[in-house]
Image (cartoon, grey):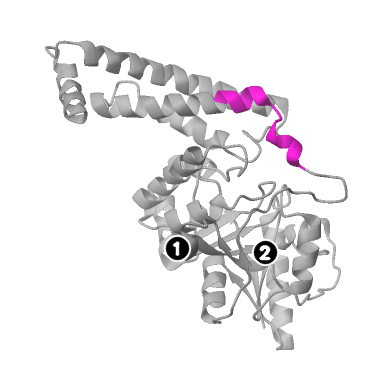
Amino acid sequence: MELILGAYVLLQAFFQRWWRDQSELMQNTVKQLVNSGQLEFINGGMCMHDEAAPHYIDMVDQTTLGHRFIKEEFNVTPRIGWQIDPFGHSAVQAYLLGAEVGFDSLFFGRIDYQDIAKRKLEKSLEVVWQGSKSLSSSAQIFAGAFPRNYEPPTGFYFEVGDDSPIVQANITRTNHIMWTMGTDFKYQYAHTWYRNMDKLIHYVNQDGRVNALYSTPTIYTDAKYAEHQSWPLKTDDYFPYADRLNAYWTGYFTSRPGLKGYVRVMSGYYLAARQLEFFRGRSEKGPTTDSLGDALAIAQHHDAVSGTSKQHVADDYAKRLFIGYKEAEELVAASLACMVDSGLKSGCRSSVTKFQQAKQ
């Protein structure tokens, strides 16, 4: 039996800010880690988007924005979907992140407490998820729900010094089991975590019955595929989500309607602005849609458009959208001016030609 420890996702919105501040030496070191497989990008979106409130175009756009950066900087493409914290899951993810993005697997943490209890007994936490009836098998993906949200097993929060014994639950098919280590606000002392995980792996492997190792979701997925196991078929949503009796999270479908509306309006504006940006052409010094695209991407986060953030955080999302809008507004105005111009101005000629070609 193999016990796989690890699995961590870093939102691109944070990683890219860190990346831009690093020296060339540090950037080269990170690239070496990626090339060797020691560091792996999973999910790869600018954020981990919600699956109920966003428009599907916004889900695609924010994922594309993150993947484009990873491709340009590291020449790799993420293989694993990692939606571990959204509050329920839509079958459209199996389609968008399977057939369209091309992920090999999709993992998530939050499903209804009764559903997860039943699936543990039936060993059906991991399934083949088919997200579209019309596309059938071409829109399916290997998907798995974690047995305990995305947290470590009880007793393995190394920051608080809990040393309860390991209890291995037989709840998955095949002999490969993934343990996620760390959770929200619980990875502040990395050295302590890794020192204790080193000890855990060492002593577990001394027993000989279990092979524990640091791993990645890609290695775990490959191991599951290699078993040629048959998996239950899932064709519907993992909605609604409740984490205990009478504790349904469906209220977030309508919470903060003002922010939800603003995100949707800005999404439509962004789509139109990008088309105008193409007709006019990008300028190194002129306004672009980049700021609005970045703001919209992080606004799809499962604590943003969902309406589940604190007020000052929701205010910050709205502020970023407004800043992006004002920059895009300048581009839109200039682009529309070019379209009605006679074409004599050098800066407008190319856009007029593109516009005429598009109409033809």
Q: Is residue 346 left or right of residue 287?
A: left
Residue 303 at x, y percent in the picture? 66, 38
Q: Secondary structure at mark 1?
A: helix
Residue placed farthest to the left in the image?
A: 344
Q: Is residue 274 above or below residue 125?
A: above
Q: Tell me the quarter of the picture where residue 171 sits.
A: bottom right
On the image, numbered disc 2 is attached to which residue?
194
For the question of whether residue 78 can be seen, the reply is: no
Q: State which mark lies toward you, 2 or 1.
A: 1
Query: Relative to 296, is 84 on the left or the right?
Result: right
Residue lying at 21% horizontally and 27% vertically, measured from the top left:
359
Q: Is residue 271 left or right of residue 212?
A: left
Which residue reaches farthest bottom?
208
Q: Where is residue 227 drawn, in percent x and y?
A: 56, 82
Query: What residue did someone put label 1 on?
Result: 138
Q: Residue 261 magenta-drawn?
A: yes
Q: Position of residue 327 (x, y in %)?
A: 41, 19
Q: Which residues are magenta?
A: 249-262
